[in-house]
Image (cartoon, helix red, strand yellow):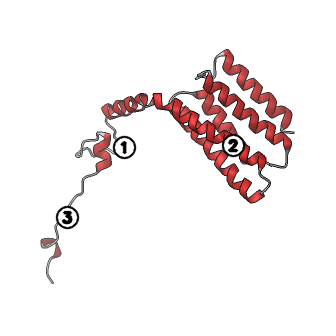
C-alpha cells in the first residue's frame, strides 16, 4: 500500500467571516474579536440611524394596512396569515428600535408581537388592545420618543397599560 499523505495536500480555506470581523488569521483564541472591529461595526450601525426613521415609518404603514385588512376580513384562514404578518411587522419594529436605542418603541413592538399570539378576531376587546398598541407606536414615532424614562413615555405606557387592563378580561 502506498502512503496517501505523500499524495494528498491539505488546503486551508480563508475564513472570510474572521477576516471581516478583524480577527487575525493566525489568532487561535476561541471567540476573540478585535476591539477595533467592534468599534467599526458600531460606527456602521450609528451611520444607519438616519435610515431608522424611514424604515420604521414604512413598517408602521404596513402594520396599519395589515390591521385594517384583519378588521375588514371575515376569512379565518386569511386572518391567521395576516396576524402572522402583523406579528412580524411588530417584531421588525422591535428589532430596529432596539438596534438604534429607541427603547420605548422596542417595548411597544415586543408587546404587540406577543399579543398577536392571543388575538381572537371575534373578540372586540382585542381590537381595542391592538389599536392601542398601534396608536402609541405612532405617537412615539411622531414625537421621536426614544427612552422609557420621560414623562411622555410614561404617559404612553400608562395609556397602553390601561387599555390592556380594561379590555383583556
| Residue extending farthest bottom | 1
Horizontal side, residue 168 vs residue 89: left or right: right
Camera-side residue of 142 and 4: 142
Horizontal side, residue 46 vs residue 91: left or right: left
Badge 2 marks a residue whose secondary structure is: helix
Tell me the number on the disc at residue 55.
none
Measuring 81% from the left and 28% from the top, which residue is drawn there? 162
x, y percent for residue 25:
24, 46
Q: Earlier in the sequence, mark 2 or mark 3?
A: 3
Q: Looking at the picture, does residue 101 appear above or below residue 4?
A: above
- Snapshot quadrant of residue 40: top left
Q: How many marks?
A: 3
Whether residue 90 is visible: no
Q: Residues within 10 Å of mark 2 (few under 14, many from 20)?
A: some
Measure the C-alpha gap from mark 3 to mark 1.
Answer: 25 Å
Circle 2 residue? 114
Circle 1 residue? 31
Amino acid at each position: 500500500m502506498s502512503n496517501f499523505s505523500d499524495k494528498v495536500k491539505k488546503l486551508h480555506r480563508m475564513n472570510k467571516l474572521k477576516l471581516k470581523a478583524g480577527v487575525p488569521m493566525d489568532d487561535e483564541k476561541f471567540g476573540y474579536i478585535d476591539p477595533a472591529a467592534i468599534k467599526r461595526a458600531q460606527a456602521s450601525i450609528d451611520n444607519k440611524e438616519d435610515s431608522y426613521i424611514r424604515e420604521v415609518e414604512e413598517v408602521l404603514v404596513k402594520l396599519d394596512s395589515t390591521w385594517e385588512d384583519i378588521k375588514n376580513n371575515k376569512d379565518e384562514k386569511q386572518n391567521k396569515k395576516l396576524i402572522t404578518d402583523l406579528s412580524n411587522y411588530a417584531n421588525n419594529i422591535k428589532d430596529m428600535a432596539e438596534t438604534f436605542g429607541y427603547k420605548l418603541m422596542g417595548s411597544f413592538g415586543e408587546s404587540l408581537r406577543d399579543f398577536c399570539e392571543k388575538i381572537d378576531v371575534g373578540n372586540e376587546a382585542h381590537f381595542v388592545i391592538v389599536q392601542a398598541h398601534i396608536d402609541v407606536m405612532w405617537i412615539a414615532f411622531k414625537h421621536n420618543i426614544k427612552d422609557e424614562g420621560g414623562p411622555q413615555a410614561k404617559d404612553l405606557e400608562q395609556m397602553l397599560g390601561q387599555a390592556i387592563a380594561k379590555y383583556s378580561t
